[in-house]
């Protein structure tokens, strides 16, 4: 079009109109393409999320299904001595009761009963021991005891252990699998929700293992981290932002704090090992030392978040307070800080949620030990959720495979709850004004 | 600090806007000078913003500072209660005396000074707290009330003097930020009055308000001038003419002329003043 090559001022209105319309189509096309790219990006991100979480859920949900057996056991007085309850072989008695249920008897060598013992958890025997200890009058009676099947039996029921694999490469031989089928057919096995996973702590037997100890350990560690990192961080940031003179030294401090936020977390673990454990003799693998190390790690993040929340408070509030005759401290603590609270709280909770998931520094300070119970106090031995996941992942037993995924799910739920708390706290502080 | 007047005397019966005769106007300017500025220079870093300002601000009267944008009126105003201290790199030279004592002297605590010299800003900035808290904050931190009843009395009398009481008496515990612009500015004035200042500085208090709200604030200023020394910076010459007894004209950092409002507006001595008033610039 010859018209298009002329300068705009000399083109006729019609030609201009046509040029605008032609270009318009192009602009709309660009816009549609951009929106499409945006949607594709979101879909890709969401699919990764679904893939990741979906895989973990698929791997771990079976942990929450457990198989329990109820069997009546006769506590023969000749085998149980009321003065020495622990001396009796309860596992053997339970195994014999199960054999009886199967309609079989034990042989002289005891091979059948030892094979059956591999199918049931020794939790059943522990329950009997506890009952006898508490109330010796049960000796001589028949008690029905309910307990979980051993991890491998449960794996067979879930389909993880298949008959198709050759007998030598499985943990359970054909006879045991046959017994399991019989018990199931006879209705002696009940499936239920494995609440024990959430109410028990770590154990060598997978069917008795749970995350309670790790959850409590994580919670105790987070309490220490929060008590240390939040007050120190908020006060330090307030001082640096409101009171400190702006010179080269404060610039240097700010650069260093920003750098510390980016330091790899394992370095804090080394620091914790050298300073807290070796020099200050804080008990190794305790929530106290874990909390101290995590507090150091969370501190730079809290300081940075607080500073930016303080910077966002409009200067008119400060002027209003100063104009009425408030001192600088009063201005900051009565007016500026309360207004900055939503940002401060969000930063604090997010840095705590971050500290919850850290594994490397805690491995360095020794929290990788086997802790079969809830930690006693802040100086007792403890483990935390991410480390528990790490330990179970390295365990040799097959059943820990699904438990690792289930523990990851518990960890994710914990983090979602903390992030929701951050959002609610923020909303609550913001809604007031 | 002066004591609060009794409530009964707070609203005098005199009408709000009366024609002041020439003698009365001269009288007003003849009150002893509350704030005396001599050779005041203000520097922002290397740049000088005020050059040798000499001004006497009379007590119990309204003094207006007029001039084009950027001429230093607000800077001068902020020197009186040392709000320029909060600006890094700002340096004040010269003498500013409140009742004879230099405000920049080392022995003077800015916190105490700002309770004697209150300030109202251009954009209403009530605290994001309840109306009651806004007014009560000042008396509380300065310890002006010994118990809750006294504090409530101070809040009530300040809101009445700022002619806001009738509108907010039933919602004292609602946020101050929920009021309209004009109401917020009166709340800010009540907040300033609550600490019983001697001087009230107003930096373009009506520039963010509509004409009706402006008229109410001007009425309020007229009532308040019988008790306080008021200095008002304004862009509107009509406002300066309506409200003030003394006027100072600033231009490019210098105080060009100062005197009784009538004289400045009808018979200015300097040609720059004449040009500004007739609208040739600014």
Image (tube, coloured by chain):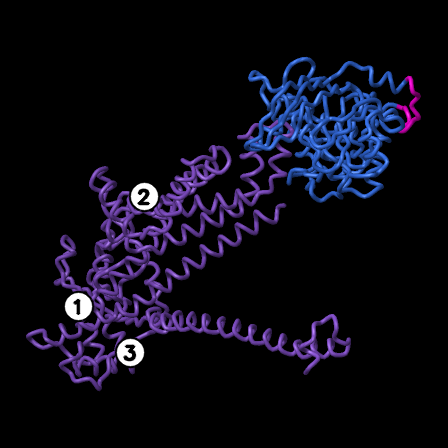
Chain colours: A purple, B blue
Please state if A360 lies on the left or on the right of B64 as rendered: left
Determine which residue is flagged by label 1: A93
Which quarter of the rendered picture does the N terminus of chain A lie within?
bottom right
Say whether residue A22 is magenta: no
**Under tag 2, what secondary structure?**
helix
**In front: A49, or B277?**
B277
| Highlighted range, magenta | B13-23
**Could you tell me residue B20's position as x and y percent?**
91, 23
The numbered mark, 2 or 1, whose residue comes first in the sequence reads 1
Q: Viewer-nearest of labels 3 and 2?
A: 2
User: SS for tag 3?
Assistant: helix
Q: Quadrant of residue A274?
A: top left
**What residue sits right under mark 3 in the picture?**
A157
CA gap between label 2 and label 1 equals 49 Å
A318 or A77, which is in the foreground?
Answer: A318
Q: Is residue A138 left or right of residue A239?
A: left
Looking at the rendered image, the disc whose residue lies closer to the viewer, 1 or 3, is 3
Q: Position of residue A234 (x, y in %)?
A: 45, 40
Mark 2 or mark 1, whichever is nearer to me:
2
The reply to whether the magenta stretch includes residue B14 is yes
Task: Tell me the residue that label 2 is attached to.
Answer: A292
């Amino acid at each position: 079009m010859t018209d298009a090559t002329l300068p705009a001022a000399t083109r006729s209105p019609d030609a201009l109109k046509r040029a605008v319309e032609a270009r318009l189509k192009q602009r709309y096309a660009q816009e549609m393409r951009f929106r499409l790219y945006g949607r594709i990006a979101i879909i890709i991100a969401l699919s990764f999320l679904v893939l990741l979480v979906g895989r973990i859920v698929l791997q771990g949900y079976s942990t929450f299904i457990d198989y329990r057996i109820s069997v009546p056991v006769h506590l023969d007085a000749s085998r149980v001595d009321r003065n020495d309850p622990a001396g009796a072989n309860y596992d053997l008695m339970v195994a014999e009761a199960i054999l009886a249920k199967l309609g079989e008897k034990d042989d002289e060598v005891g091979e059948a009963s030892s094979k059956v013992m591999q199918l049931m958890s020794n939790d059943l025997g522990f329950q009997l021991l506890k009952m006898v200890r508490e109330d010796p009058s049960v000796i001589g009676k028949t008690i029905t005891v309910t307990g979980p099947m051993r991890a491998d039996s449960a794996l067979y029921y879930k389909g993880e252990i298949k008959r198709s694999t050759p007998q030598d490469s499985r943990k359970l031989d054909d006879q045991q699998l046959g017994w399991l089928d019989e018990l199931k057919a006879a209705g002696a096995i009940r499936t239920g929700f494995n609440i024990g996973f959430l109410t028990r702590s770590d154990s060598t037997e997978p069917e008795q293992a749970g995350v309670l100890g790790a959850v409590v350990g994580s919670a105790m560690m987070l309490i220490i981290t929060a008590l240390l990192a939040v007050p120190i961080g908020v006060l330090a940031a307030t001082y640096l932002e409101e009171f400190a003179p702006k010179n080269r030294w404060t610039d240097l401090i700010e650069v260093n704090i920003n750098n510390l936020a980016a330091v790899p977390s394992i370095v804090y673990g080394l620091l914790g090992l050298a300073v807290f454990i070796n020099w200050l003799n804080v008990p190794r693998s305790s929530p106290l030392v874990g909390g101290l190390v995590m507090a150091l790690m969370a501190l730079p993040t809290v300081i940075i978040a607080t500073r930016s929340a303080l910077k966002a408070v409009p200067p008119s509030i400060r002027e209003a307070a100063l104009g009425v005759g408030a001192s600088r401290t009063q201005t900051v603590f009565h007016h500026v800080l309360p207004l900055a609270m939503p940002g401060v709280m969000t930063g604090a909770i997010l840095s705590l949620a971050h500290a919850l998931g850290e594994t490397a520094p805690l491995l360095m300070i020794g929290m990788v030990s086997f802790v079969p119970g809830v930690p006693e106090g802040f100086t007792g031995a403890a483990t935390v959720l991410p480390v528990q996941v790490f330990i179970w992942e390295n365990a040799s037993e097959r059943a820990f495979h699904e438990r690792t995924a289930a523990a990851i799910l518990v960890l994710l739920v914990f983090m979602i709850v903390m992030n929701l708390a951050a959002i609610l706290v923020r909303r609550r502080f913001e809604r007031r004004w | 600090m002066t004591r609060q007047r009794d409530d009964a005397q707070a609203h005098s019966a005199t009408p709000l806007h009366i024609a002041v005769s020439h003698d009365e106007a001269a009288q007003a300017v003849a009150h002893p000078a509350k704030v005396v500025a001599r050779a005041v220079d203000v520097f922002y870093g290397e740049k000088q913003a005020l050059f040798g300002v000499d001004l006497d601000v009379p007590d119990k009267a309204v003094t207006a500072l007029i001039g084009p944008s950027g001429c230093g009126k607000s800077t001068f105003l902020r020197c009186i209660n040392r709000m320029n201290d909060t600006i890094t790199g700002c340096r004040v030279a010269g003498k500013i005396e409140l009742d004879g004592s230099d405000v920049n002297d080392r022995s003077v605590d800015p916190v105490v000074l700002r309770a004697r010299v209150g300030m109202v800003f251009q954009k209403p900035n009530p605290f994001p707290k309840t109306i009651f808290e806004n007014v009560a904050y000042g008396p509380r931190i300065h310890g002006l009330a010994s118990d809750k009843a006294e504090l409530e009395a101070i809040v009530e009398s300040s809101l009445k003097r700022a002619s806001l009481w009738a509108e907010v008496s039933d919602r004292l515990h609602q946020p101050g930020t929920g009021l309209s612009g004009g109401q917020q500015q009166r709340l800010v004035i009540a907040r300033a009055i609550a600490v019983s200042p001697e001087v009230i500085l107003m930096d373009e208090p009506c520039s963010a308000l509509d004409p009706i709200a402006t008229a109410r604030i001007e009425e309020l200023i007229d009532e308040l001038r019988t008790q306080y020394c008021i200095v008002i910076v304004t862009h509107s010459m009509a406002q300066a003419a309506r409200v003030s007894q003394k006027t100072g004209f600033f231009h490019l950092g210098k105080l060009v002329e100062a005197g009784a409002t009538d004289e400045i507006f009808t018979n200015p001595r300097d040609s720059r003043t004449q040009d500004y008033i007739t609208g040739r610039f600014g």
